Amino acid sequence: VFLGEWEGGMTRVHAANGDPRWLQAIEEGEWGHIPGAETTAQLTERCMGGLHRIEAANVGKRVVCIVHGGVIAAVLGHIAGTRQAFQGAENTSINHVIASDGRWRVRSYNDVAHLGGFTPSLYR
């Protein structure tokens, strides 16, 4: 996510201080509340554009993409038609998306079984 004036670690400072713009961004799932940041729609368009390019270059192949949680939320939310459902993916979680016949589907989200007895923070 391009975070505008809050790049370079400033997001953490604003979050720790309970900045109302941060709280609104998290509550609404809208990055555009941060000064100069890209909107969630812009992030989603950028990420889906990248996925479409990857898909076109790898028809019929299995592909792995390593991305941050904001990208996971934007892409899976777009595919599933919901903005908030995919917030908070765990580090190293596996999120499985299938693209075929011009359709995208979410197969799994936030799978951490490969980590053994790990308890995801979403369920603590």
Image (spheres, rainbow, N blue to C red):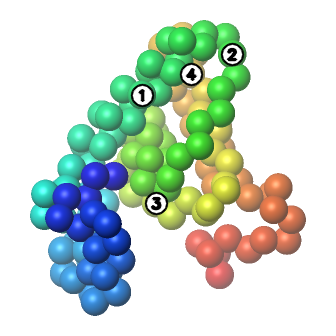
Question: How far is mark 4 from mark 1, CA to CA?
Answer: 13 Å
Tag 3–tag 4 contact (CB < 8 Å):
no
Residue on which disc 3 sits = 87
User: What residue is shown at x 36% (from left), y 77% (from top)?
Assistant: 12
Reading the chain from its start, which is encountered first: label 1 or label 3?
A: 1
Crowdedness of circle 1 by 10 Å Cα count: few (<14), some, many (20+)? Answer: few
Where is residue 85? Give x, y as percent. Answer: 46, 56
Residue sitting at x 60%, y 10%: 59
Provide the secondary structure element on which disc 3 rests: loop
Residues under numbered marks 2 and 3 in contact, where contact means CB atoms less than 8 Å apart: no
Q: Is residue 109 left or right of residue 56?
A: right
**What kind of residue is marked 1?**
Gly
Label 4 – label 2 distance at C-alpha = 10 Å
Label 2: how many residues lie within 10 Å, few (<14), some (14-19) or many (20+)?
Answer: few
95 or 82, nearer to the observer: 95
Q: State which tag comes first along the sequence, 4 or 1.
A: 1
The numbered dot on residue 50 is 1
Q: Which element is circle 1 on? A: helix
As helix, strand or loop, the secondary structure at mark 4 comes to: strand
Q: Which residue is mark 2?
A: 61
Q: Position of residue 46 (x, y in %)?
A: 32, 34
Disc number lying in front (1 or 3): 1
**Does label 4 or label 2 sit earlier along the sequence?**
2
Front residue of this view, candidates 119 and 15 = 15
Residue depicted at x 19% and y 81%: 20
Q: CA distance from mark 2 to mark 1?
A: 16 Å
Residue 110 placement, left or right of 70: right
Q: Nearer the viewer, mark 2 or mark 3?
A: 2
Circles 4, 1 touching at the beta carbon (< 8 Å): no
Mark 4, residue position: 99
